[in-house]
Structure formats: structure tokens, C-alpha cells
Image (spheres, grey):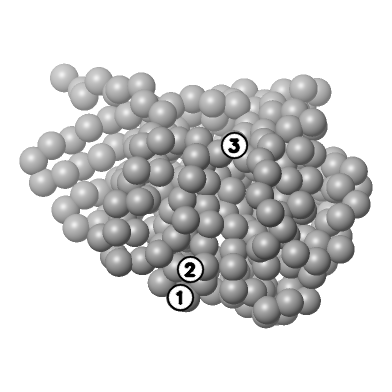
Amino acid sequence: MGIRPIRATWYGLPRYYDIAFQSETPAEADFLEAAFRRYAAIEVRRVLEPACGSGRLVCELARRGYGVVAFDTCRPALTYLRRRLARRKLMAHVLAADMNRFCLPPVFDAAYNTFDSFRHLLSEEAARGHLRSVADSLRPGGIYVLGFHLLPPDASEHCIERWTERRGQTTVTVTLRVLTTDRRRRIEHIRINLLVRGRHSTRRYFDEFPLRLYTARQFRRLLGQVPHLELCDVFDFWYEIDRPLRLTDELSDAVFILRRR
């Protein structure tokens, strides 16, 4: 008899989420530092991460000597992050706030959000409010590194991805499946399945949620409504700082470098 999956919020399982993406962390942090050096018009020492989740990049950048402020709405993730920082004797300021609209003083040299959290903002108003809030929190010349998936016109509407990561005696297998895609309403529904194997137990979890869709043209139009942010360059998830790309409708994995005017 199979193991019955338990419905659980994907972000409310921060340890498993953290394990699932741990291999991405060094390359992302290296790219962020390279982007800070290349695109920021000011020295980057103080950084902001909206929707920080389990805080894998918070810990990594704090370890590298940055002053980090991070926030999220998921209480289990924030608790996990605070404990992890304390365990590693790292310093970062962690708070509960919504990425939709937030109000922080303009003291940050850079901000970053690297993997699709932006698409949880399901309306144009919410996305615009987020970008304006980020712009208001940055010093002039500071940058925002924003990463998320675009939808090319010929993209398959039913995508499946699967990968496995291991930490110690815990192995996490993630299966991500696109359930439905509505291009008119610009919404797709995602199902996440987690298979967690430990030394003495095996557990299954699942979650489902909507994400907003963007083509390159749609994101350009949105960015045009936030005049304090200018687009500097675009990359993909290979994070090759010397290989910027053209923002076209063929691009699917996008990392935008936005600078505060």
C-alpha cells in the first residue's frame, strides 16, 4: 500500500525547501556579488531580500559579510531562518512582511529575489506595488536582481520537472507539474509533490497554488509603470555574468538587473 500524501504548504516545510534548492545557492550568491560589482553605481554592503523563504541566500550573504534584511509572510520559514542564523552565529534582520506592499527606508544598496516568488503576485496592481516598494527602499544607483520564469509563445502548457537533493540522511525529491495554463487570465496552476526519505521513515507531501504568467513584452510594459527602475541587462538561470541576453519572447528563464534611478 502506498504512502498517502499530506497536503502542506510548500513554503511551510522550510527544511525540505532549503534542501531542494541547496545546490543553487553558491552559483546564485556568486552571481549576485558579480552583479553588485558590475551594475550598482554605489558600493553594495546592505542588501534586502523580499519573500526570503527558508533564507538560504540570507545565510550565504550574511556569511560573506553583507548586512542583510529579509522578510516573508510564512511564519514557519521565518522561525527556521532565525534558528539557522543563530546556530551558525550569523547576523541578519528578519521580519514578517508582505512583498505586495512594504515600507522600508531607502537605505539598501541592493535587493534580490531570484526564483519565481514575484509570480505569486497575481495582479498587475500587486506586481506594480512590489516593484515600487523595492524602488523606494533602494538608494539611487542601487540594483534589484529579480529572477522568474517567462512564458514563450510556443511553450508547452503542461510541464513536469523532477529533481532530487540530499542533506545528511534526508533525501528530498521534488516533482513540479503545471496543471492548467490560462494565457488570457495570465494564470497557471502548479502542483508540487515532495517525497522525503529519512533514515527510518518516508513521507509524501503536496501543495497546489496559482502563479502569474509573463511574456517578455508584458514584463516590459509593467516595468514602464515604475519609472524609478531602469532595466540594465537580462540573464538566464545559468548565471553567466559575462553573457547578458536580449529580452525577447523566446526567453524562458530570466534574471533582470534593475537599477534605481
**SS assignment at label 1:** loop
Residue 225 percent location from the top left of the image: 90, 43
Number of other residues with Cα within 10 Å of mark 3, as a class: few under 14, some 14 to 19, many 20 or more = some
Amino acid residing under circle 1: Arg
In the rendered image of this protein, does residue 48 appear above or below residue 218?
Answer: below
Q: CA distance from mark 1 to mark 3?
A: 26 Å
What's the mark number on residue 98?
3
Q: CA distance from mark 2 to mark 1?
A: 5 Å
What's the mark number on residue 64?
1
Residue 74 in sight from this viewpoint: yes
Q: Residue tagged by mark 2? A: 61
Are dots 2 and 1 in contact, CB under 8 Å? Answer: yes
> Could you say which quadrant of the image residue 142 lies in?
bottom right
In the rendered image of this protein, does residue 145 appear above or below residue 219?
Answer: below
260 sits left or right of 18 in the view: right
Residue 233 in sight from this viewpoint: no
Amino acid residing under circle 2: Leu
Q: CA distance from mark 2 to mark 3?
A: 22 Å
Residue 93 percent location from the top left of the image: 47, 56
**SS assignment at label 3:** loop
Residue 50 percent location from the top left of the image: 59, 48
Q: Identify the residue at horizontal 8%, vertical 41% (top origin).
A: 200
> Could you say which quadrant of the image residue 213 lies in?
top right
Extreme residue toward the left, this view:
200
> Could you say which quadrant of the image residue 23 lies in?
bottom left
- The C terminus is located in which quarter? bottom right
78 sits left or right of 198 in the view: right
Q: Please state which of residues 144 and 256 is positioned toward the viewer in this rendering.
A: 144
- Label 1 or label 3, whichever comes before in sequence order: 1
Amino acid residing under circle 3: Asp
**SS assignment at label 2:** helix
